[in-house]
Image: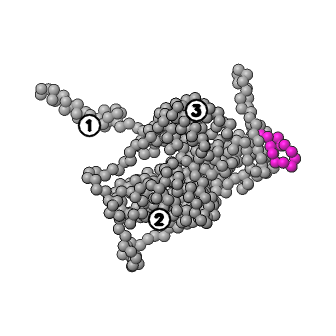
Amino acid sequence: MKRVFWCFPQCVKSYEYYHPLILVDATFLTGKCKGVLMTATAVDPEGQLVPMAFGLAEGENNESWEWFFALVRHNVLGRDRKICVISDRHRGILKAVSQKMEGLPPLEHRWCMRHFAANMWRRQRKEEVISKLKELCYAREERYFNKLHHELEKMLNPKAKAWLDKQMENKSMWALAFDEGGSRYGIMTTNGAESLNNVFTAICALPISGIVMYSFEKCNKYFVDRWGVTKARKDKGEVWSKPMEEHLNVEMKMSKNQVADAHGPERKIYNVKSAGGTKHGGERFGGRNYRVDLEKGECHCKVPQLFHAPCSHLITACMERGLDHTASKFFSPYYRKENTLKIWEPMFEPYYDPTQWPEYTGCNYCPDSDLLKTKVGRRKRKRLKGDMDECNRSGTDKYSTGNFDDSTVRNRCGTCHQAGHNCRKHKSDRHDVILRMLG
């Protein structure tokens, strides 16, 4: 047996209520066999994660990723919705996502911003360059994107500039401003998938049955705990997910200082003027105008198009027109609390111990002997640090959680309580003093 794939019907059933996207990643195994654990992760309206599918393969290559994506598309994603995949730029993933499968809609592919920034770090190791690149990735308006791009080009060396110029051909993959149809729902990184990998790190040394059993128990706990929390919040009268409730409160507050002017009695086009003022030196600030199209549910700021939720300008125009800004035309139904409750409604059934299982008469499976580790010594349990880790350690990572694997806190000595060393240093110092006395 060379590869294993599994998914739970409860996760598959709940996927229709998730945002139509998945985060894909893989982590290496630390047990007796070589290989990787592949995961496809969904994100609920509260920003919580749940693994939708798992795969064990010999490694990350073109064949293994094509195998994994084919099974995920047939068994999990289905044929009703167009799904966006957010991942790094591994060649196997790029090839697997681009493949067309009969009877299934094509996949939309977007790149992880952290991995994209790490590629820039290889060519120019400067904190300010990485910070500016991430601002460029997260810019919503094309005008602002062009301004940041012009500023970034002045900071780049020839090698980095040539690389970025080449990536501009595929800017829809990494730049939020060019995310057609808002496929990302504002999610810029695969931090969720990598954080989930961190959860499974402790069991990557177990045999296959142990990994499958742990994944079952973990998913069951997710569903039970989160259903209880969501049900309690819905009973309190909450309508929207917590992140969306916070977004609405901010946008409603901003809309109070805006004015909407109609352009035509029949057309639902409005010019919304935001609040502005004058500085002490007489320089004006703010007071920008935004074009809102209530017929299409769009705004010049691109928040409704990218996040599928109303911005303050659209709310102002709706109030002027007498429309409900929470209508499905302006708001994705995925953000509603009742939708979140449906995600966690499917329940897992307990499984019996092996002595009560029905008799198995199928084939006997055993691990591929070629995948057994033969190296003498302690097995590797920590991954090698790469450019992304070094990149995330520099400066403040504004748009991601930074380095999630290791704490940035330095070691602290248990004897003198100073950072930068441990108590063994004092033992060696005492040993040197004794040797000098004896000498």
Report the amino acid beneath label 2.
Answer: Trp
Task: State the residue position of label 3.
Answer: 152
Report the amino acid beneath label 1.
Answer: Arg
> How far across and down, in percent of the image, does residue 249 sit?
67, 45
Report the amino acid beneath label 3.
Answer: Leu
Q: CA distance from mark 3 to mark 1?
A: 46 Å
What colour scheme has been applied to the protein in the rendered image? Answer: one colour
The crowding category of the residue bearing disc 3, from other C-alpha atoms within 10 Å (few below 14, some 14 to 19, many at least 20), is many
In terms of sequence position, does the residue under pointer 1 or pointer 2 come before the other?
2
Chain part drawn in magenta? 260-272
Q: Is residue 335 visible?
A: yes
Task: State the residue position of label 2.
Answer: 6
> How far across and down, in percent of the image, does residue 144 sit?
66, 36
Task: State the residue position of label 1.
Answer: 424
Name the quadrant containing residue 346: bottom right
Q: Dividing the image into 4 quarters, which one contains the C terminus?
A: top left
Q: Secondary structure at mark 3?
A: helix
Q: CA distance from mark 1 to mark 2?
A: 47 Å
> How far across and down, in percent of the image, does residue 368 sit?
35, 64
Of all residues shown, which one is farthest toward the right?
265
Q: Which mark is residue 63?
A: none
In terms of sequence position, does the residue under pointer 3 or pointer 2 come before the other?
2
Which mark is in front, 3 or 1? 3
Q: Are marks 3 and 2 in contact (CB under 8 Å)?
A: no
Q: Residue at x 52, y 30 (%)?
A: 157
Q: Residue at x 56, y 55 (%)?
A: 98
